[in-house]
Amino acid sequence: MSNTVKEAAEAARPQGNEMMGTAKNVKGDGDAVANDFLHTPFMRAALPFINGGISGMVATTVIQPVDMIKVRIQLAGEGKAGGPKPTPLSVTREILASGKALDLYTGLSAGLLRQAVYTTARLGFFDTFMGQLTSRAKAKGQSIGFAERAGAGLAAGGLAAMVGNPADLALIRMQSDGLKPVAERKNYKSVIDALVSIAKSEGIGALWAGAAPTVVRAMALNFGQLAFFSEAKARLKEHTSWSGNAVTLSASAIAGFFASFFSLPFDFVKTRLQKQSRGPDGKLPYNGMADCFAKVAKQEGPLRFYRGFGTYYVRIAPHAMVTLIVADYLGFITR
């Protein structure tokens, strides 16, 4: 993993890493063969993508109930200025009252597929871009700066979001299906069932509905994490006497706040666009990202874009930390 990604996970790296490293050095020929395989050109290029995907899937499994609640909050009171004002607690109670605790994991298969595609691409592209930028800078006798790191993060986030949009769309459809009248529910059996059903009924292009805000959201999210993590860490080191672990965790929490602040409006619009379906007149409620922003601001008020901010933050910050911690650990054991 690159240094930028590793920094955010440093606080949670197991203290036994040195012991594991020593143990590796005394193992037999079998480990030597495995080590040689891990260091083949193909595997060195593929590992950032593989580790990124696995880490994202672990984090999603942990955070999925929070994501489910976040989506339900965003979809409540659509088209009304007042409307219901659900809280995370009330949404959780409603879900549990209407089914079982496992209903909070509705859409997990789509969430895992999304991470297998999106986070695999995001961390893989980022690591690849950073490696290329570092090599180029070293050749010139220079070091890469914040602008290069931010650019790599923005590009990686945007590309990964475009690739992962179909899985993200399926996740939103599966999570919002329970809000429809019983007769109108699709009752998707899995993410594959959802993707096939959407493609058959709405066309292949529909799988990229909401792609524009999805890409912008990913870029805003990555920018918030990179820019404010670096800045907060530098400030905390300068003005506090905290330990390195405390500084890293605190900087991660601050970065999570700003990443949430910048990306939530786009996440909100993405959810609305991906959830929408044609009405009896054959028309969609929103014609695109700009139209959705305008209609929500007019009909529901501009503050609606930040509804569920607390839930979104609770989803973003831990997900980022778990992803980076697992990715860093995988990077350690496969280096």
Image (tube, rainbow, N blue to C red):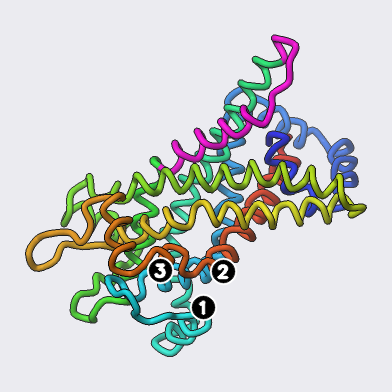
Judging from the image, what secondary structure is the residue with disc 1 in? helix
Residue at figure coordinates x 72%, y 43% from the top left: 231
* Residue beneath disc 1: 88
The residue lying at 38 percent from left, 52 percent from top is: 167
Q: CA distance from mark 1 to mark 3?
A: 11 Å
Q: Is residue 24 left or right of residue 298?
A: right
Left or right side of 45 for 25: right
As shown in the figure, which amino acid type bears the numbered disc 2? Gly
Q: Which quadrant of the figure contains the C terminus? A: top right
Amino acid type, residue under disc 3 in the picture? Gln
The amino acid sitting under disc 1 is: Pro
Specify whether 332 is left or right of 312. right
- Does the image show residue 333? no
Whether 222 is drawn above or below 250: the answer is above
Q: Which residue is mark 3?
A: 74
Residue 314 pos. (x, y %):
60, 66
Marks 3 and 2, Cα distance to the nearest angstrom?
Answer: 12 Å
Q: Answer yes or no: do the residues labelled 2 and 1 have beta carbons within 8 Å?
A: yes
Q: Residue most toward the top?
A: 140
* Segment colored magenta: 138-161
